[in-house]
């Protein structure tokens, strides 16, 4: 008997599976609401949160539900992009053949966004992930690149997603013009203790387990250690299942959690 079936699970809900389990917490719903508002207002939005708090999950699910006849979603990771790379990548995502000079790509990208927005009635949504690594040159160009009709029109939505230090960068005086264009800024705080317990329960139910395999003390220990970070909750719970299997038990106790934490070098 493997550790999954021993615990009455159809699959391990705490690791990446082909079937994604989406838990819509209060914070998830708040971000989702704000993202839907920016669909109407357009302009710039910022979402920050420490590593593992679910920023990419929220953005992926929100953008995946959008009507492709109304919105064109472009995803760009900024972890290693130079200014030149950014322009070339954006041009390619817009179906263009990148030019050698930034000025040429600039005009071509603006024209393509105008065609999409005005002629085809399609709103481009540019998602800049890992934006805490954003090159200052890219930040300096963003406001100009998305300036249409003497700054009287917003033809696109630009979402910057990254770690909290992204806001520190945006708060620099040099980026004041761009910061004034930001219409939505949300920081993910993470799950509360109650939400952490609900998160685990919902994950288990989605995997076909309706028994209380995590004791109350175990849930408290996980909540206290994970700090409301979904990725950390998943890591601890996954290790708990393995520890429980080795001990040939079907109940996860506080002792199980402590052993799992120690073996995972968490804390």
Image (cartoon, rainbow, N blue to C red):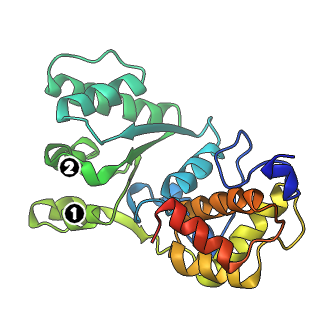
Count the labels in the image. 2
Residue 38 x/y as whole percent: 48, 60
Image coordinates of residue 122 in percent, x first then y, are 52, 37
Question: Residue 76's image quarter?
Answer: top left
Residue placed at 16% from the left, 27% from the top? Answer: 102
Viewer-proximal residue among 118 and 126: 126
The residue identified by callout 2 is 139
Earlier-in-chain disc, 2 versus 1? 2
Q: Residue at 82% of width from left, 57% of height from top?
A: 206
**Mark number for residue 99?**
none
Q: Position of residue 210 (x, y in %)?
A: 90, 66
Q: Secondary structure at mark 2?
A: helix
> Would you say 129 lies left or right of 17 here?
left
What residue sits 62% from the left and 36% below the top?
68
Residue 110 or residue 158, whichever sits in front? 158
Q: CA distance from mark 2 to mark 1?
A: 9 Å
Label 2 Cα crowd, 10 Å radius (few <14 / some 14-19 / many 20+): some
Label 1, residues with CA under 10 Å away: few <14, some 14-19, many ≥20: some
Residues under numbered marks 2 and 1 in contact, where contact means CB atoms less than 8 Å apart: yes
Using the image, determine if residue 92 lies above or below residue 123: above
- Residue annotated with mark 1: 170
Residues 197 and 77: in front is 197
Q: Secondary structure at mark 1?
A: helix
Is 45 positioned to the left or the right of 213 in the image?
left
Residue 175 at least partly seen: yes
Screen quadrant of the C terminus = bottom left
Task: Return the x and y of residue 149 as percentages of the image width and height.
Answer: 27, 45
| Residue at image location 36% in from the left, 19% down from the top | 96
Does residue 220 appear left or right of residue 37 in this picture?
right
């Amino acid at each position: 008997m493997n550790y999954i079936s021993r615990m009455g699970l159809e699959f391990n809900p705490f690791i990446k599976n082909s079937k994604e389990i989406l838990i819509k917490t209060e914070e998830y719903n708040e971000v989702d609401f704000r993202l839907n508002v920016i669909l109407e207002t357009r302009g710039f939005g910022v979402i920050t949160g420490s590593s593992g708090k679910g920023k990419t999950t929220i953005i992926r699910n929100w953008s995946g539900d959008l009507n492709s006849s109304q919105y064109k979603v472009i995803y760009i990771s900024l972890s290693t992009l130079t200014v030149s790379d950014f322009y070339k990548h954006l041009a390619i995502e817009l179906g263009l053949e990148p030019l050698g000079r930034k000025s040429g790509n600039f005009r071509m990208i603006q024209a393509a966004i105008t065609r999409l927005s005005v002629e085809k009635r399609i709103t481009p949504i540019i998602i800049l992930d890992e934006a805490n690594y954003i090159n200052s040159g890219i930040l300096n160009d963003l406001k100009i690149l998305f300036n249409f009709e003497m700054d009287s029109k917003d033809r696109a939505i630009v979402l910057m997603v990254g770690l909290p230090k992204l806001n520190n960068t945006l708060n620099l005086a040099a980026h004041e013009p761009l910061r004034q264009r930001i219409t939505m800024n949300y920081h993910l705080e993470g799950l509360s203790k109650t939400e952490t317990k609900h998160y685990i329960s919902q994950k288990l139910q989605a995997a076909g387990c309706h028994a209380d395999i995590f004791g109350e003390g175990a849930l408290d220990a996980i909540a206290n250690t994970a700090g409301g970070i979904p990725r950390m909750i998943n890591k601890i719970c996954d290790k708990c299942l393995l520890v429980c299997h080795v001990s040939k038990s079907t109940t996860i106790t506080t002792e199980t959690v402590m052993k799992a934490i120690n073996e995972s070098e968490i804390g």
